[in-house]
Image (cartoon, rainbow, N blue to C red):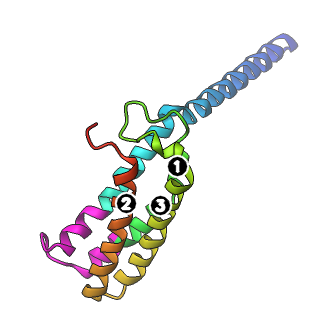
Amino acid sequence: MNRRVTQRLLTAGMIGTLAMGAGLATAHAAGTSLQGAVDFRQSTMTILKWYLQPMGGMVKGKIPFDAATFSNKATGLAKAASLDLTEGFPKGSHEDTEAKPEIWEHWDEFVEKYKALQIEADKLQKVAATGDIDAIKAQFGATAKTCKSCHDDFREKDK
C-alpha cells in the first residue's frame, strides 16, 4: 500500500472509532435518563410480580401448591429483589407514573421499605426450600406485606 492509502485508512478508522465512542456515550446518557430509570423500575416491578403472583395463587389455594415451583419462584423473587430498585427513582421521575412525589420527601423511609422486601424475600427463599406449607404461608404473608406497605404509602392507585 502506498502512504496516502494508509493515511486514509487510518483516518477512516479513527473517525469510525470516535463515532462509536460518541454512540456509546449517547447510549450511556440515554441509560441514565429519567425514562431509562422509569423503564428500569417498571421492568423490575414486573419481574417481582412475575414471581409473586403464582406464589400468591398457591398460598390462597387458587392454584395447586407445588413445593418445587414455589421454591423456584421464591428464589427468583429473592434474586430480583436484590437489585437496587432505588436507582430507578431519581428525583423528578414520578411524572406520568404511579410513583407518588412523597417518595422523595420521605426517601429514607422508602429505602427502608425496599430493604424490608429484600430481607423478607430472602427469608421466603429459605423457608420455601423446607417445603413446610404453614411456614411458607406465614413467610409469604410477611413478604407480601412489605410490598403492600410500600405501595400504600408511595404508589398512586388511579394512574
Residue occupied by mark 3: 113
Amino acid bearing label 1 = His
The image position of residue 35, as x and y in percent, is 47, 32
Q: Secondary structure at mark 3?
A: helix
Q: Write down the region rendered in magenta.
A: 52-73
The image position of residue 34, as x and y in percent, is 52, 33
Q: Residue drawn at (63%, 31%), measured in percent from left and top?
A: 24
Residue 149, labelled with which disc? 2
The image position of residue 107, as x and y in percent, is 55, 49
Q: Secondary structure at mark 1?
A: loop
Say whether residue 41 is magenta. Answer: no
Residue 106, labelled with which disc? 1
Distance of label 2 from label 3 (alpha carbons): 8 Å
Distance of label 1 from label 3 (alpha carbons): 11 Å
Crowd rating for badge 1 (residues with CA inside 10 Å; few <14, some 14–19, many 20+) = few
Quadrant assignment, res 62: bottom left
Q: Secondary structure at mark 2?
A: helix
- Considering the whole magenta stretch, tell me its main secondary structure: helix
Crowd rating for badge 2 (residues with CA inside 10 Å; few <14, some 14–19, many 20+) = some
Is the C terminus in the top left, top right, bottom left or bottom right quadrant? top left
Q: Are marks 2 and 3 in contact (CB under 8 Å)?
A: yes
In this picture, is 147 found above or below 135? Answer: above
Amino acid bearing label 3 = Lys
